Amino acid sequence: MKYRRIPDETIQRLPMYLRAFSLLEGEKELTVCSRQLAVRLGLNPHQIRKDLSYFGNFGRPGVGYPVQTTARRIRHILKLDKTQKTALVGAGRLGTALVAYPGFSSFNLEIAAVFDSDPKKIGKKIGHLTIESAARLAGLKKRNIHLAILAVPADAAQSVTDKLIKAGVRGLLNFSPGRLKVPASVKKIDIDLASQLSILPYYL
Amino acid sequence: MKYRRIPDETIQRLPMYLRAFSLLEGEKELTVCSRQLAVRLGLNPHQIRKDLSYFGNFGRPGVGYPVQTTARRIRHILKLDKTQKTALVGAGRLGTALVAYPGFSSFNLEIAAVFDSDPKKIGKKIGHLTIESAARLAGLKKRNIHLAILAVPADAAQSVTDKLIKAGVRGLLNFSPGRLKVPASVKKIDIDLASQLSILPYYL
DNA sequence: GGTCGTTTGTGAATGTGAGCACAAATAAAA
DNA sequence: TTTTATTTGTGCTCACATTCACAAACGACC
Ligand SMILES: NC(=O)c1ccc[n+]([C@@H]2O[C@H](COP(=O)([O-])OP(=O)(O)OC[C@H]3O[C@@H](n4cnc5c(N)ncnc54)[C@H](O)[C@@H]3O)[C@@H](O)[C@H]2O)c1
Ligand SMILES: NC(=O)c1ccc[n+]([C@@H]2O[C@H](COP(=O)([O-])OP(=O)(O)OC[C@H]3O[C@@H](n4cnc5c(N)ncnc54)[C@H](O)[C@@H]3O)[C@@H](O)[C@H]2O)c1
């Protein structure tokens, strides 16, 4: 396999593939071909083959993809073969919903720390985690946490982000609306729920 | 202006433009040029001009875009000039966070009904809304609600979706993971938070 | 060992969005 | 009125993701 630039779009589809392979793993399937997988996921078999081929030869012609091996390799590519700890900042309505969500663990993702600035919330338990003061954000590097979820009000988002980056965070999932400035070395994903919902009426 | 197909990407950027224009409206600005707007939004002035030009001539050369008029026209395009009622199905952790979120109203979006299947929840108040039985979904058409947010567990998602569509819903914001089958006449937007978070470690 | 049906991997073709350059339009100044 | 400084709108080009087509690889069966 020659080197080719890997499209961001391909990376974005990997979790979907991983979810499918994990499911097949549970069903004790040994192999799966791109056609079956495409039906399951509602997309094009060519796309799946090309996506996977960026990372080397996963499958065997005439057979398909070995379920267990491929699942493992995708986990490795996404660095999900080790549990990835994530910090959550903002223990508000959205934040508490996210902490309680069990669906992250199947990807080996773990919310390992929760921060808030509200003195009334600090020290309270949220699941098995204790809400910490935002002043303690600087300690994230020592705790080996390099990812963060941002669920604070928009006007606090930039200052919290700056602190997070200073604390060594290099991946950010941002729920607050409005632009957030981050250096190029930090990967940021924005989820603007109001904007997403605003799109729907257009298609009515 | 000649007819050109409008890219989905353009539509997806319109809420962002609308938010910026609404803000400028509040600041009593009369006009804004694509360059200023681009700085604010962190993107390319050419892109903004091209996007807006799909919908006719918004701006005046040498001056820029009239703030109020343009805000109004974008609202009209997105059909946000009238309040758009939305149903929420699944009054769980995520659902309650969404109902309480005040950020939808600035787009003229309103969560106008909440449904759940849990008898213990039905009848309870959530904000100023009363949680209704999922059996009452069929009444959505009469209540003029054509949009829905899906915040139910994955295994209930498809059956609820089918009911929603039967009830006349034509736009869907789906938070449950896994593929959801909908007819082509229905616009569906998937938000898979676990997948999004799974992408971050790759870039570490 | 040879043939046949199946499935992968990948170079090439296609389609589409983003970026660019410039002409036309506008306002303000000369 | 003419000139100059801006800024829009848009055809064109470029970059890139998706789709296609086919050769090579593989297993099964004879
Ligand atoms: N709730 C939703 O459904 C929803 C939907 C879309 C977007 N959002 C966005 O998500 C973010 C959070 O929303 P929410 O509804 O949970 O808000 P919320 O007000 O319920 O919670 C925000 C929390 O952040 C904490 N906080 C404020 N400043 C802080 C700081 N500097 N450091 C640490 N913590 C701080 C507050 O104490 C509070 O607990 C907002 O930006 C909002 O726009 C929320
Ligand atoms: N909580 C999160 O932060 C989060 C994150 C990512 C994705 N999600 C997804 O969002 C969805 C909801 O998550 P949640 O954490 O709020 O779950 P939850 O279990 O807290 O809430 C689900 C609600 O749906 C109701 N419900 C179940 N079946 C129903 C039916 N047939 N009709 C109507 N209501 C029904 C339940 O009674 C419950 O109140 C899930 O699909 C989940 O995967 C949630």
Image (cartoon, coloured by chain):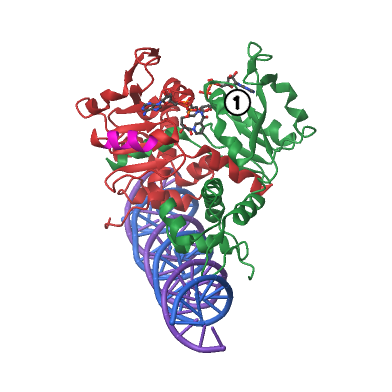
Chain colours: A red, B green, C blue, D purple
Estimate the x, y position of residue A192 in percent, counting from the top left: 49, 40
Give the residue pinned by disc 1: B156
Pointer 1 local density, CA inside 10 Å: few below 14, some 14–19, many at least 20: few
Mark 1 C-beta closer than 8 Å to ligand 2? yes
* Residue closer to the observer: A183 or B173: A183
Residue at image point 28% right, 38% down: A170
Callout 1 amino acid: Ala
Q: Is residue C4 above or below residue A179?
A: below
Chain letter of mark 1 equals: B
Estimate the x, y position of residue B21 in percent, counting from the top left: 54, 50
Numbered range of the magenta stretch:
A157-165
Q: Quadrant of residue B155?
A: top right
Q: Quadrant of residue B149?
A: top right
Name the side, left or right, on which A77 lies relative to B168.
Answer: left
Magenta span includes B151:
no
Residue A21 in view in this figure: no
Estimate the x, y position of residue D6 in percent, counting from the top left: 45, 69
Q: Quadrant of ligand 2?
A: top right
* Residue closer to the observer: C21 or A135: A135
Residue B145 in view in this figure: yes
Name the side, left or right, on which A76 lies relative to B152.
Answer: left
Q: Quadrant of the C terminus of chain B?
A: top left
Disc 1 element: helix
Q: Is residue B57 above or below residue A97?
A: below
